[in-house]
Image (spheres, rainbow, N blue to C red):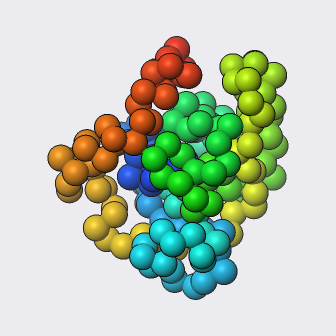
Amino acid sequence: MEKATFAGGCFWCMVTPFEELPGIHGIVSGYTGGHVENPTYEQVKTGTTGHVEVVEVTFDPALFPYERLLELYWPQTDPTDAGGQFQDRGTQYAPAIFYHTEEQRLAAIASRDALAASNRFKQPIVTRIEAAQAFYPAEDYHQGFHKKNPEHYKKDRQASGRDEFIDVAWKEEVSV
């Protein structure tokens, strides 16, 4: 098993693309990249801890290669927006890939460079690629939020603008 860590705005919305796929063994919403140990959601959402909301995906690379995770990751984000994602603004919602191995780093760079070369976006790709740091799981009520609170999740996602952006910018890339 390996870990992959992705930031793409609200972690609630970043869980579902990776769910229930062969070779994916777990998805945990949490925080990484900051200077406060064991931060809370209330602390992270202020943008003062240096953390980013992320999902940590546990996967079997023999069944679901890291490159395929990257193919799922990119179309969930606006890789040109370093100021947050959709309605979630601030550095705590900025897009980032946190690699756990040198192979992941190289694959992430190659996928970012291929996306930039595709000219899909007029603006530069600003998604950070950084070494994984300490990961702190979010509070229990954030885990599987879309299943525990489906109405709240649907309203929040609908209001975010994420799906409209995906439909326009990524329409042919969204299928698995």
- 133 versus 167 height, above or below: below
- 38 versus 145 height, above or below: below
* Of residues 79 and 110, the one drawn nearer to the viewer in this rendering: 79
* Of residues 46 and 27, the one drawn nearer to the viewer in this rendering: 46
Q: Position of residue 74 (x, y in %)?
A: 60, 35
Residue 161 in view, yes or no: yes
Q: Position of residue 18 (x, y in %)?
A: 45, 41
121 left or right, relative to 4: right
Which residue occupies the extreme bottom position in the image? 37
Q: Position of residue 162 (x, y in %)?
A: 44, 36
- 38 versus 10 height, above or below: below
Residue 3 in view, yes or no: no
79 left or right, relative to 103: left
* Of residues 51 and 131, the one drawn nearer to the viewer in this rendering: 51
Residue at position x 75%, y 51% in the image: 129
Which residue occupies the extreme top position in the image? 172
Residue at position x 54%, y 22% in the image: 170
